[in-house]
Amino acid sequence: MGENASDGDADGGNTDCADGSAGTNAAADDLNVFITAATVEGRSGGPLAGRTVAVKDNISTAGVRTTCGSAMLAEYVPPYDATVVERLKDAGATIIGKTNMDEFGMGGTTETSRFGPTRNPVDPKRVPGGSSGGSAAAVAAGEADLALGSDTGGSVRNPAAFCGVVGIKPTYGLVSRYGLVAYANSLEQIGPLAPTVEEAAALLDVVAGADERDATTRKAGDGPGGETESGYASAADGDVAGTTVGVLTDLTAGADERVVSVFEDAIADLEAEGAEVREVSLDSIEHAVAAYYVIAMSEASSNLARFDGVRYGTPGGFEGDWNDAFARSREAGFGPEVKRRILLGTYALSAGYHEKYYEKAQDARAWIERDFEAAFEDVDVLASPTMPVLPPKLGESLDDPLQLYLVDANTVPVNLADLPAISVPVGEADGLPVGLQLVGPAFGEHRIVRTASAVEG
Ligand code: GLN
């Protein structure tokens, strides 16, 4: 825990560690990167032997508490590992802690965490992005070699861009969600963060692939060219000759001009290396933020129903009937952003409004999917700035939830369309990192890795 924990601090201390080796590191502590420090050794040998990995605190770790950045789960210690954690251990990685995050993944700055905000290692007065801000900051600060985050609407790519590291949001179904605490299950994937494209791709090689415990994972050979779910690291060969890159003009239009200028330089670099560049406009994309928030909040209202102090979460006591007890548990356990979303999601799903909001959002989602599919008939990858803005100062954006939702404009279309995307650092503006987002067709991770490796700076 850092000194900067908010007054909503729900931290019970770094106590619930598998092997009792809890400890904190000064630099990580200042930035408030970890909610729980823990050392979990993998097996000896394997592709990640000798590598340290920080794991977002919504990914279950047997014997190590998993809080989702919430007071509700401040004492929750999962009895089992997420599939990705099993795969990390099998690959020989050492897990070094559970990273800070926006509460249940709801946010884009890591400021909605009940454990206080994380600071951006590039400029500690600024947010690291979110919701996987602790994971991105851990890598950027050199606290961990690699990290896992989760991306429901941008939460791997956003903090990767703000902290100047690489982040990948895999195609829906490439990585098992078994053991990931659900926020909006139809949208989210666990994804890697790393200092370089090749290392992020190597971590994806370890965690990707079918899992019989997650029926939404897909089998090998689903790539546009029949690619399998491996060999991502070796795709980072920088060879973009003949690759067609479509610039998503709708997503550069509203962006900060300092961001756009770095973005345009990166596109010019790709062109100089032999890529062909075209402009692409998608009519549906302006509806993505609205559709995303209706769907994400609706799913959240349903997924978070299990936190009632009986099935999961802090008990609400014995006074009154069960309804009073559930209400007390949820009132104390959830922060304001989580409550806002549960209320809005419940409203959007309620009889009479279901057709007006939820079904309309599903229609928009299908339209966005079709638009992307059509675009990939003409181009190999699509490009935009990952974030339309530079990282804001701590406290600057939290007051206005709508403002916070709008900065997701460039990342959420990808989740709605189930597609893979990477954020790669391509330069700086005013000393702050700028990320390039490259989007691929379903299971087209190899080509976004390849293109990103040609331009990483
Ligand atoms: N900022 C988005 C949201 O709050 C995305 C979060 C995420 O990907 N977990 O929903």
Image (cartoon, rainbow, N blue to C red):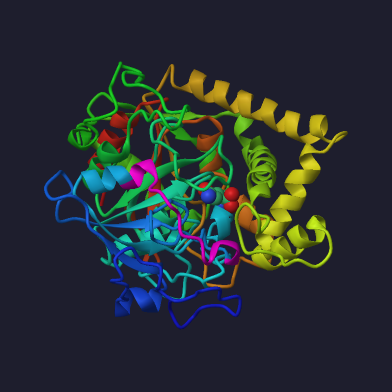
Q: Which residue is found at the position 58% from the left and 73% from the top?
A: 395
Q: Is residue 81 magenta?
A: yes
Residue 107, x across and y down, in percent: 57, 57
Residue 145, x across and y down, in percent: 24, 58
Q: Nearer the viewer, residue 335 or 248?
A: 335
| 423 displayed left or right of 282 | left
Q: Which residue is found at the position 24% from the left and 50% from the top?
A: 196
Residue 393, x across and y down, in percent: 52, 71
Q: Is residue 288 visible?
A: yes
Q: Which contiguous range is marked in magenta? A: 71-85
Q: Nearer the viewer, residue 33 or 321?
A: 321
| 237 displayed left or right of 105 | left
Residue 26, x across and y down, in percent: 31, 80
| 376 displayed left or right of 27 | right
Residue 388 in the image: above or below residue 113: above
| 377 displayed left or right of 113 | left
